[in-house]
Amino acid sequence: MTTLSAAAPRVRPLAGVGQSLSLAWRGLVQIRHNPMELGDLSFQPIMFVLLFTYLFGGAISGDPQAYLPFMLPGIIVQSGLMATMNTGMGLSIDLHKGFFDRLQSLPIARWAPLAGRVISDTVKQGWSMFILLATGYAIGFRATQGVLGILGAFGLMLAFALLVSWFAVFIGTIAKEPEQVMMYGFTAIFPLSFLSNAYVPTHTLPWWLQAFVKINPVTQLSDAMRGLLTGGPVLDHALYGLLGGLVFAVIFAPLALVRLKRR
Amino acid sequence: MTNAILAEGLVKRFGQTTALNGVDLAVRQGTVLGLLGPNGAGKTTAVRILATLLRPDAGRATVGGLDVVRDAHRVRGLIGLTGQYASVDESLTGSENLRLIGRLHGFDRGAAKARAAELLRDFRLEDAADRAAKTYSGGMRRRLDLAASLVARPQLLFLDEPTTGLDPRARADVWDIARELVASGVSVLLTTQYLDEADQLADEIVVIDHGRVIAGGTPDELKRQTGAQTLAVRPALESDVDKVRAVVAELAASPELAGGVVTAQVTDPTVLPVVVRRLDDAGVAIAELALRTSTLDEVFLALTGHRAEQEEEIRA
Ligand SMILES: Nc1ncnc2c1ncn2[C@@H]1O[C@H](COP(=O)(O)OP(=O)(O)OP(=O)(O)O)[C@@H](O)[C@H]1O
Ligand SMILES: [Mg+2]
């Protein structure tokens, strides 16, 4: 028979959404049994905000309180970017433990396992960002652009993370073991997040470094985040930053999907 | 329809490696087919194709009468898969694992919970139901894995090396579960490197090596097909083994010596009195003398000229 499989039933899209939500539930309920992850999601953000503010604030801005409004939007972008690697790590663990095979052998939508993971990781991202902001508030940070500004900041960050997580998914599919994901990921993401104006004003850098920092989407996104939280131009920076994220997605989404299909 | 699974000419290549090189298989409804082969023979690759996880490069296969490529989604509704490495989510509890699978099969919350409770009871995991699976022993994890593949009561089950790495007690547990399932009408494709496991569980056995089927039949047929009965002689004095080996060598090809016992494959049962007479003539006192049906280990040796490699890969 050479007829196409038009008649073969597939998963209805709505059922696929339900399956994705079940798998997202899995990603969230895990936290209960894994205190390490709770620490990663909650204590690490608190620690970083306090550390950067009081350790570097004086040196960089002359005063921690002056540094906080500059740094907090930057740290939000930077830790959001780092956290995308968790998506790749989780995927890699599923691939190596055979759990991914189990899911693929179930009568569910092919995209549900990935979608479920991304949904739960997005919720975790949102939580970490909330903790960063709350910690900032506790030590004197104030968002001046109202609720819309804050919602915009969440939206922008989560959208950017969603685009970049295709890179993490790709790393997850090529890593020989889950530990490698963090290694590859940090190698790529560390320079990207630190060679930006997330923590230091661009004009303090040598000219050749400025050249890179200015075109780095993390810089643009940090500036957009500053605009949304404490005032200043937003749109151009946000679009530029998202365009950077889109480049990641356009390159790595097809590569990742091919890797997943041809295992 | 009498074949639960039918595969014809399956070929699968990974780069330079040909994992399957034209494999035919048939699992009759309600029976166990044992797919037997050493490391790297292609067992897992065959299972993954039949469970719709891989597409074959050539050949075709049906599961429950449905094509595994064209009708993959419907095939997934019929099968249960217990992969080679117990594939549960280790950071979820036993109960959460089973409820998740239930939900993914389309059970509502209540039904998923009830089915999970039922399986946890059947598989003696009630006490561990609310503990993270990473705290389970190997045997418990295997049982949870089996339970997870049975959530939707599949009529067709794939068991890929279900007892590799388990202690004898946990192995016997898995065997009992498999027997019960078959008794209730489930068809099973079992892969194993343990020859006694295939002998114990399988109605029919297919032996594969380097991606090719090298023999097939019922366990007894297989033993007969290789012509093999095994003659085993243990002299009363360990120092006599060389004399014994010399005598046996006159009557059968390539006798082997292991643990003070000389064994050789023979086809003609009438050698027995001859052996006794010649050993007597040579003045050898015999502690043990037997003519028995060959084990599958010996069958494998006769078929491939090399022993089934039993070394286990160290994988987490
Ligand atoms: N995804 C893959 N990529 C590359 N090579 C593979 C892949 N899967 C299997 N192989 C190769 O195909 C051959 C058959 O592998 P397979 O896993 O099917 O063997 P097996 O009989 O299950 O072995 P084992 O007893 O070790 O589980 C091996 O040489 C293996 O290295
Ligand atoms: Mg295998």
Image: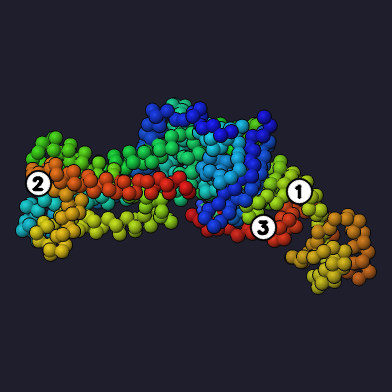
Mark drawn on residue B48 = none
Seen from the viewer's position, the closer of residues B32 and B112 is B32
Q: Amino acid at mark 2?
A: Gly
For the point 80% across and 65% down, the residue is: B255
Give the class, few, some or many, for how many residues have Cα within 10 Å of label 2's Cα (few <14, many ≥20).
few
Question: Which residue matches tag 2?
Answer: A140
Q: Position of residue A22 (x, y in %)?
A: 39, 34
- The answer to the question of whether label 1 and label 2 lie on touching residues, with beta carbons closer than 8 A, is no
Secondary structure category for the residue under label 1: helix
* Distance CA(mark 3)–CA(mark 2): 70 Å
Question: Which residue matches tag 1?
Answer: B222
Q: Is residue B157 left or right of residue A250?
A: right
Q: Residue furthest front?
A: A2
* Distance CA(mark 1)–CA(mark 2): 80 Å
For the point 15% across and 64% down, the residue is: A208
Q: Position of residue A121 (x, y in %)?
A: 32, 42
Query: Disc 3 or disc 2, which is closer to the eye?
Result: 3
* Distance CA(mark 1)–CA(mark 3): 16 Å
